[in-house]
Amino acid sequence: MGVFDTDGSEATGHEQVVFCQDRTSGLKAIIGIYSTALGPALGGTRFYPYESEEAALADVLKLSRGMAYKNSLAGLDLGGGKAVIWGDPVRDKSEALLRAYGRFVESLRGRYYTACDVGTYVPDMDVVSRETRYVTGRSVQNGGAGDSSVLTAWGVFQGMRAAAEHTWGSPSLSGRTVGIAGLGKVGKYLAGHLIGDGATVVATDVNPLALEWARTTHPEIQIVADTQTLIASDIDVYAPCALGGALNDDTVPVLRAKVVAGGANNQLAHPGIGKMLEDEGILYIPDYLLNAGGVIQVADEIQGFDFERAKLRATGIFDTTRRILQLAGDEGVPPAVAADRLAERRMAEVGRLRSIYLG
Ligand SMILES: NC(=O)c1ccc[n+]([C@@H]2O[C@H](COP(=O)([O-])OP(=O)(O)OC[C@H]3O[C@@H](n4cnc5c(N)ncnc54)[C@H](O)[C@@H]3O)[C@@H](O)[C@H]2O)c1
């Protein structure tokens, strides 16, 4: 994808891409604003040791576009943006670098709001906030929404309930077996919701600390050796909650679940996987629809964080999932295509309102 590429519709195409450099602190960042049709662009900052400038640019273009779709579908009055800092977060992160970055974010005067992503954490956003107002995902002590995985997991649970209703006629997961790959921040909360609903949880993680958490907090979780074993076991729902690319040419043919609904980003290894899942009769709920609870949580911070208000909005992922499943049925397309259409429609229709002169 190039900076100026569009698919021809009015609501798409990157609006602005900003390269930021501060030689003294070593900051090299790119801020991508895909769309402000619905409002200021919101999306996290990824701090990552890219192989090249081209790789960093490609990632920010892809991620900022993804945020526009996620924010639109979540019903937020926010556009899509994302930033990347090119460097090794362990070696290169410093107060000076983060503050330099904050000043560049501030220079956009609210066209872009930042937040955490891979390689950046709540305390980093506290540092960034010393230079800019346009930052979310700060600590609770600093007026922020804190750990966004709380509502991410809540939203995944809501979307999974809608998928269960569509597949088995009842939104309850009681009596179903759900396989969670990755008992990290999102996976742990999700496991708690599922157990509370009466589901059987089977899980795996590569981190012994995560498994220890399961043993001590929820001994009823059945632990299996690895993801391969998990997906080949007798599960009704597969919830990828680790890294991207969980659904690929090797995993889909052995998957036993009827439904895939998880929190991980970019679950489809390539676009052809969507068709493969459909051919196998597996219902895939788009990842960016399900995991929007996190962005809903941090977006709420812009108006002064209120957990209950944000939770109510994240609960709406149940209804949005229902709507998408309905639309997918009506239009004869997979849910992933229906989700993209709904997101694009909202960007086009609501974005168009800006053309009404306010006097
Ligand atoms: N935290 C959020 O608010 C949020 C929001 C939207 C999307 N997501 C996405 O959800 C996913 C999980 O995020 P998180 O915040 O829980 O991250 P995390 O790092 O806390 O948890 C990921 C877990 O997956 C485990 N894992 C890694 N590789 C694995 C493998 N091969 N097999 C099994 N387990 C493996 C890790 O050990 C870790 O416990 C990521 O894809 C993230 O991008 C998170």
Image (cartoon, rainbow, N blue to C red):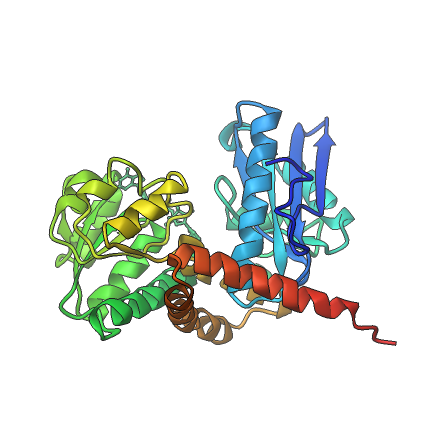
| Picture quadrant of residue 330 | bottom left
Q: What residue lies at 45% left-to-right and 75% top-to-bottom? A: 312
Whole-percent x and y of residue 104? Answer: 73, 43
**Side (left or right) of 324 relative to 12:** left
Whole-percent x and y of residue 46? Answer: 54, 40
Counting labels gives 0
Q: Is residue 49 visible?
A: yes
Q: What residue lies at 58% left-to-right and 54% top-to-bottom? A: 68
Q: Is residue 10 above or below residue 163?
A: above
Q: Is residue 314 above or below residue 24?
A: below
Near-viewer residue (48 or 161): 161
Q: What residue lies at 24% left-to-right and 65% top-to-bottom? A: 194
Near-viewer residue (76 or 257): 257
Residue, far right: 359
| Picture quadrant of residue 55 | top right
Q: Quadrant of the C terminus?
A: bottom right
Residue, far top: 51
**Side (left or right) of 110 relative to 82:** right
Whole-percent x and y of residue 261? Answer: 31, 57
Near-viewer residue (211 or 187): 187
Q: Is residue 173 above or below residue 134?
A: below
Q: What residue lies at 66% left-to-right and 56% top-to-bottom? A: 11
Q: Is residue 169 above or below residue 147?
A: below
Q: Quadrant of the N terminus?
A: top right
Whole-percent x and y of residue 40? Answer: 68, 58
| Picture quadrant of residue 338 | bottom left
Near-viewer residue (207 or 20): 20
